[in-house]
Image: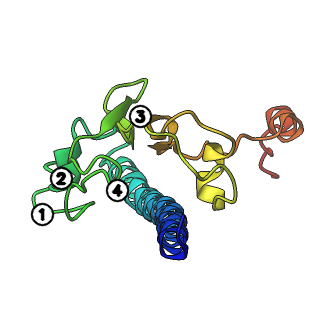
């Protein structure tokens, strides 16, 4: 074999190795960019989910009268028909960042209406910890984004302690002095 042929073989082998290394580098970069995009969508999902949670809470807490109610449909958050003047709890129905669609899974309240939303995405989340206090129920590994539920639960009315209740029951009204 001549020296020229050997050099062509080494050049070809070197070019193939260079192409393989460049391909592996591009694949790693693509994976990293994909993860970064998914993390960005997760942050947007957390923001949008909390916008829905706050709007549902404002609708519920703003119910006129004593019997509180949840919205019957998401569009009720855009224009609250319970008041004579226009009242908006949400500016628009946001698209689900994970699916890109304006369709959401709905969490029904026990007494009727919608108490929350969740993504319809079946993709597995990257984030499993480090959530804000308001999202602490999302902590831990989840199989899919559909398990991330953004619900509004009203704060329970503070109950009187049993000792305070008993002392009020035992008190007799003061009789007027004559």
The label nearer to you, 2 versus 4, is: 4
Say which label, 4 or 3, has the lower sequence index. Answer: 4
The residue beneath circle 3 is 122
Say which label, 2 or 4, has the lower sequence index. Answer: 4
Q: Does 131 appear above or below 112?
A: below
Q: CA distance from mark 4 to mark 1?
A: 15 Å
Instruction: Please say whether residue 118 is visible from this viewpoint.
Output: yes
Q: Residues within 10 Å of mark 4 (few under 14, many from 20)?
A: many
Does 45 sit left or right of 176 as displayed? left
Say which label, 1 or 2, has the lower sequence index. Answer: 2
Residue name at image x 18 percent, y 52 percent: 80
Instruction: Point out residue 4 in the picture as x, y percentages from the top left corner.
Output: 48, 76
Q: Residues within 10 Å of mark 3 (few under 14, many from 20)?
A: few
Instruction: Please say whether residue 67 is visible from this viewpoint.
Output: no
Q: Secondary structure at mark 1?
A: loop
Q: CA distance from mark 1 to mark 2?
A: 7 Å
Residue name at image x 61 percent, y 42 percent: 156
The residue beneath circle 1 is 86
Q: Does 177 appear above or below 44?
A: above
Q: Secondary structure at mark 2?
A: loop
The residue beneath circle 4 is 55
Q: CA distance from mark 1 to mark 3?
A: 37 Å
Q: Out of 51 and 125, give the one closest to the viewer.
A: 125
Q: Secondary structure at mark 3?
A: loop
The label nearer to you, 4 versus 3, is: 3
The label nearer to you, 2 versus 3, is: 3
Q: Which mark is residue 80?
A: 2
Labelled pair 1, 2 in contact (Cβ < 8 Å): yes
Labelled pair 4, 3 in contact (Cβ < 8 Å): no
């Amino acid at each position: 074999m001549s020296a020229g042929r050997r050099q062509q073989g080494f050049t070809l082998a070197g070019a193939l190795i260079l192409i393989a290394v460049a391909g592996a580098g591009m694949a790693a970069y693509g994976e990293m960019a994909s993860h970064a995009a998914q993390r960005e969508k997760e942050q947007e999902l957390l923001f949008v989910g909390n916008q829905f949670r706050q709007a549902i809470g404002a609708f519920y807490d703003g119910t006129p009268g004593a019997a509180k109610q949840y919205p019957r449909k998401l569009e009720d958050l855009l224009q609250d028909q319970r008041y004579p003047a226009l009242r908006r709890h949400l500016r628009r129905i946001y698209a689900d960042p994970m699916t890109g669609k304006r369709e959401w899974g709905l969490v029904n309240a026990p007494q009727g209406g919608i108490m929350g939303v969740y993504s319809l995405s079946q993709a597995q989340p990257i984030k499993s910890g480090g959530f804000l206090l308001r999202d602490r129920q999302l902590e831990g590994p989840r199989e899919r984004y559909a398990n991330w539920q953004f619900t509004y639960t009203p704060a329970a009315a503070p109950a009187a302690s049993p000792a305070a209740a008993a002392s009020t029951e035992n008190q007799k009204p003061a009789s007027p002095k004559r």
